[in-house]
Image (cartoon, helix red, strand yellow):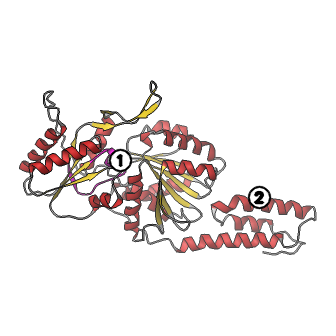
Amino acid sequence: MQTASTHFPLEELRDGIAQCMCAHRHSLRKKLASLSEAHKRNTLVDGELVRLIERIESSVKKAQTRQQNVPAITYNEQLPIADRRDEIAKVINEHQVVVLAGETGSGKTTQLPKICLDIGRGIFGQIGHTQPRRIAARTVADRIADELDVTLGQAVGYQVRFHEQANEASLIKLMTDGILLAEIQSDPYLNKYDTLIIDEAHERSLNIDFILGYIKQLLPKRRDLKVIITSATIDLERFSAHFDGAPIIEVSGRTYPVELRYRPWQEEATDVSDAVLTTLEEIQTEAAGSAGDILVFLSGEREIREVSHAIKKAQLKHLEVLPLYARLSLSEQQRVFQNHKGRRVVLATNVAETSLTVPGIRYVIDTGRARISRYSLRTKVQRLPIEAISQASANQRMGRCGR
């Protein structure tokens, strides 16, 4: 790059800025336009151009360092999404927004960030990956870091409320949708990211709806930003129409057939603990000696404690009971994903319904109830009443034993 006053290297500087970090491009382009006008008026101050070139070179060097730190990428070939990764990569490269629908067990949550990393995303900005729950953000980050063989908090990190294990050098960042919303206040153009993966969009929380609406008006201003909307159960056409006809990719999910059984609900025997205990005894009798853990969906912590106490009191042999809910400590949550001997019973709330896949599940007991967030017009407060779940949620839960 020349710095003589007789020549202003406009095109060279523009090409250089295109190789800079996303977070620096806007300010650099603004400064370049200012210096270009000053050059035309012969009012260019000595040293200004040199300082701009140094800023560009510093940003380019930072992007090159990130490129060198990209770990070796491998895929889990057993997951259905692995067979479609070339097609998915091609569509992401060719379009700014992609809608991807994959049933439970497709591997979209863990493999999509790696596909993005493989095609060169995450170099000029982070790959931001949102999850609706804190426990999902932590466990997915840990799983991706393990598959890429990197230390959690370095190339792959996460940020949830009150806790952050990521830094500026992180290539992939898992976070809750609330964290992304908070970042919009300080970074309206989301220049920190070059790719956004909005996972579990079918949950349609206020946070997700607001993010999708905000991204819609942001896209024309951030042509370099890629957005991937993913979900297990989603109205594909409506989401595609919202983003001006974004391409749709559907990935198969369940990898093993699932046998569905219904137990008659007796009005006089409405105790959940008794119903779960009876079902567990049936499974123990039918599948004596066979492998496979059991996942039980319950409505909340109180119900989990009651059922756990009933199982331990019944003294069922060779059965380890583990709880799983959002307020558990990280070490307690990690126990569910560790290797073990014997058979486990995982008592979980609806956190295990989406995003979070508990390995080794062969049986699912679904009580058909969950705490669902509702706004009360009468009291003007947000409530969490226990309600019957939807058919879509029931299918999601059923799919957890089809891995």
Badge 1 vs badge 2, beta-carbon distance below 8 Å: no
Q: Is residue 245 visible?
A: no
Q: Which of the 4 image quarters holds residue 201?
A: top left
Q: Amino acid at mark 1?
A: Thr
Tell me where residue 327 appears, x and y as whole percent. 35, 51
- Would residue 105 be counted in the magenta stretch? no
Which residue corresponds to mark 1?
354
Residue at image position (34%, 57%) is 329
Per the rendered image, the range of residues in magenta is: 348-363
Where 136 sits versus 267, above or below?
below
Quadrant location of residue 18?
A: bottom right
Q: The residue tagged with tag 2: helix, strand or loop?
A: helix
Percent from the top left, x then y, of residue 174? 46, 57
Q: Residue at x 17, y 48 (%)?
A: 309
Numbered disc 1: secondary structure: loop
In this picture, residue 217 sits left or right of residue 343: right
Q: Residues within 10 Å of mark 2 (few under 14, many from 20)?
A: few
Residue labelled with disc 2 = 30
User: Which quarter of the figure is the N terminus placed in?
Assistant: bottom right
Q: Nearer the viewer, residue 219 or 264?
A: 264
Q: Is residue 13 above or below residue 397?
A: below
Q: Residue at x 40, y 58 (%)?
A: 138
**Which quadrant of the figure has residue 203?**
top left
